[in-house]
Image (cartoon, rainbow, N blue to C red):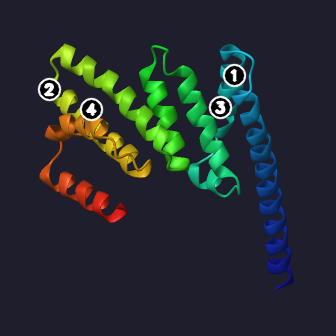
Amino acid sequence: MKSFIAMLTISLFLSFNIYSYDNQRFSKLSASFVNIKDAKNKESALEYAKQSVNILDSYSIKEIKKYSRYDTLGNIYMYYGFLIKNEKDVDETIRAFNRALEIRNDPNSHKELATSYKKKYNEAILDGNKKQEKHYGQKIYYHLDKYIVIAKIEDKRWDARLNYFEVYMSKTALAKSKKQKNKKM
């Protein structure tokens, strides 16, 4: 019995130390978010963001969400996405905004994902790939819809953009989307 209590005590001590270390690391990353946001130029902001993203990538979403200010960590991915969105690597931009959304639900990440998927959609059309065209059309619809609902946008121009991509959605997905919109209003 004493050995069980001793092992339990050691286990709790080790898990507390690991958790404490992660919290310290996340606190430093939250502070680095200020460096990214307030950087003098894009290159230094991108460098801060890349370093932070590399560290965050070593953690699961579950581990990140244990941190009390995890939304700030999601902002790191979002800013990283903003910094690289004009680069040629659309897939990395999509990954950054998706990761930001996994951490916290933000309308700007949905909007930027719709924009990034639009680039992939345009490529699919140029290549004549109907399967990918449909796939990216669905992604655009999903993220535009989320953006409009979360940001409470009532501008008809956004509805027109959304309606353009409606053709790619199944009747079930459309009904679910409209039901969610009616709930929010």
Q: Amino acid at mark 4?
A: Tyr
Q: Amino acid at mark 1?
A: Ala
* Image coords of residue 4 (percent x, y): 80, 79
Q: Earlier in the sequence, mark 1 or mark 2?
A: 1
* Image coords of residue 19 (percent x, y): 77, 57
Under circle 3, the secondary element is helix
Q: Amino acid at mark 3?
A: Asn
Task: Kindly report which numbered mark, 4 or 3, lies closer to the viewer in this rendering.
Answer: 4
Q: Earlier in the sequence, mark 4 or mark 2?
A: 2
Provide the residue designation for mark 3: 54
Q: Kindly report the distance in space between the C-alpha atoms of the residues bearing marks 2 and 3.
A: 35 Å
Under circle 4, the secondary element is helix
Quadrant, the C terminus: bottom left
Q: Kindly report the distance in space between the C-alpha atoms of the residues bearing marks 1 and 2.
A: 38 Å
Circles 2 and 3 in contact, beta carbons < 8 Å? no
Q: Kindly report the distance in space between the C-alpha atoms of the residues bearing marks 1 and 3.
A: 14 Å
Residue 108 circle label? none
For the residue pair 152 and 66, the one nearer the viewer reads as: 152
Q: Kindly report the distance in space between the C-alpha atoms of the residues bearing marks 4 and 2.
A: 10 Å
Residue 130 circle label? 2
For the residue pair 11 and 90, the one nearer the viewer reads as: 90
Compared with residue 113, is residue 152 higher up or lower down, i.e. above or below? below
Q: Kindly report the distance in space between the C-alpha atoms of the residues bearing marks 1 and 4.
A: 30 Å
